[in-house]
Amino acid sequence: MGKSFSGIRKDVSVVLCGSAGMGVQTVERLLVRIFKQAGYHVFATKEYMSRVRGGMNSVTIRVSSKPVQAEVDRIDVLIPLDKGAIEHVQRRLTGGTLILAEPDYLNDAVKEKCPRCMEVAFTEIAKAIGNKLYSNVVAVGVVGAIFGINPDLLTDFIRKRFSGKEQNVIDENVAAVEKGYEIGNELCEQHQIRMAIEPDSLVNDQILVNGVEAVGLGAIAGGCNFIGAYPMSPSTGLLTFLAKHAREFGIVVEQAEDEIAGVNMAIGAWYAGARAVASTSGGGFALMTEGVSLAGMMESPLVVHLAQRPGPATGLPTRTGQEDLNLALYAGHGEFPRAIFAPGNPQQAFDLTARAFNLAAQYQVPVFILTDQYFVDTYYNTPPFDASAVKVEHHFVETGQAYRRFEITENGISPRGIPGYGKGLVVADSDEHDEAGHITEDLDLRVRMVDKRLSKGRLLEEAVIEPTLWPNEDFKTLVLCWGSTLPIMQEAIAVFGRDDVSLLHFAQVFPLPIDLRQTLEQAETIICLEGNATGQFADLVELHTGISVDEFLLKYNGLNFTVEDVVASLEKMIG
């Protein structure tokens, strides 16, 4: 870092921290969009406690001249919005951290650890303008000045942001950001703290999207027209996103009385010809497992969005983890095939969610989208998604008089009929059944039906999304990872700088590629990085290939991995 903040910089990490209700997310939303409009690459993520008021929440915003998609531990600029904020993030502070804070937040210990402390009386300035609530907007102005953002961009953005408010509220917010900008300029002149990041014209044509929005857009592109869900953090975002766009895209949104009803409604919607998703998190999905088993017996398509958080039970409801792989893999009594996706970035989330609907419809099986709190709440600029490239595949037939819903076919996939579409009777039940769908206890037929259902699993193996090997095909050390850890691992390996270290990222975690063993056998050392305590994915890999992992990098304190986490671990493991 060094002691001077002036001059051209490539990457700055800004952290906002305060108690719930202090407006941390308001500042985040303002700054992220202002940075993007200024032409900067931007990344934002958050950590927050399970409280409506109190506790400590923080937001990390990376501003860069090049694409950034991962969180870092370091704090270049800290804006504490509460007296306890500095203590909350103190492990991330260094001698180079610039702190812009109320005078009474800065004691001698803080000044000794972080010599670059600047006193800014945000609250008093806001009160003078009209209301102490404007202190957040004053902070936006200060930061805008430090980054050298055009003041007209700031004021225009604030006017648009508060355009639905009364005129005096708009005027006072504009006055607050202008006063903050004035103070920021004074600090820059007095202390030489200007940070001029080079803009990138590519940013102008990109979108800001978080993980859950990418899942939602993928669902819409995939033809989703029904969601059944009961609100549960961190999955609720998909319910609210699809509800927001329900009228525009013809989506029926059902906030069910509980998760059992939600998944059963989704199965019923598929039976009636809709394309449905059930969305939940760990504890809610535990209630859904009987419904998943029902889909297995009915051979009903089903898409489930499972946003992971630390358990067991309520656990840490607003934190992150990768603890529900086994839950998705083994959910539901009995034996039936399934597919599980775990996207690593918004583009994968869009593509795989759209694919999930087609895959579910084609093979008539449950398909899971595994995300986590970190993934759904993290966003950055990315190229727009191409919805025109997605083809909605329905895979149902017009039934004839002799239609049999569970006809035994060569590949195990029976023709799927929709009630009322054709002359045939479409029967489905939860009991074992014959080809027409009628209950049976013919034990020989039972064997044929089980074999028929399981044979679709072999077809799913042939349709597997191959893992991403990056950056080199020649490697000595191979780091396995899955889901949301992809961008973190990519940046960490780039920083680590060893040509003989590569990552193998799995955006589909089940089924695994048939030829995976051949790739693993090339490595002298295999490391597995996961957000859980037991190495669930490593166990699955060993079960599938017979190859065990040599080293583990596991994190299960409720926080996501950071670039520094991974680099430090790689240095210890392989030097």
Image (cartoon, rainbow, N blue to C red):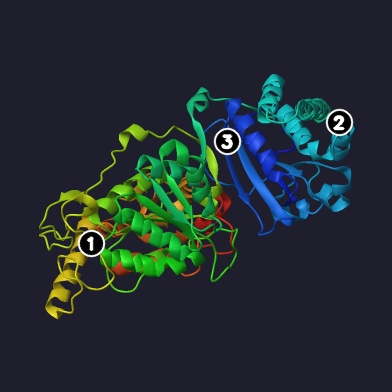
Give the x, y percent position of residue 333: 33, 74
The answer for how far apart the CA atoms under marks 3 and 1 are is 41 Å
The disc at residue 173 is none
Are the residues flagged by discs 2 and 1 in contact, CB closer than 8 Å?
no
Picture quadrant where residue 317 is located: bottom right
**Which amino acid type is marked by label 2?**
Ile
Q: Which mark is residue 457?
A: 1
Residue 236: horizontal and vertical position, in percent? 53, 53
Give the position of the N terminus as an image quadrant: top right
Q: Amino acid at mark 3?
A: Val
Q: Which residue is mark 3?
A: 42
Q: Is residue 313 left or right of residue 154?
A: left
Q: Nearer the viewer, residue 35 or 210?
A: 210
- N-terminal of the two: label 2 or label 1? 2
Is residue 172 visible in the rendered image? The answer is yes
- Residue at the image point whose x is 26% and y is 44% from the top: 393
Q: Is residue 450 above or below residue 91?
A: below
Mark 2 vs mark 1: in front: 2
| Disc 2 to disc 1, C-alpha distance | 65 Å
Between 39 and 360, the one nearer to me in the picture: 360
- Image vertical order of residue 290 relative to residue 318, above or below: below
Q: Residues within 10 Å of mark 1 (few under 14, many from 20)?
A: some
Going by the numbered disc 1, the residue's amino acid type is Gly
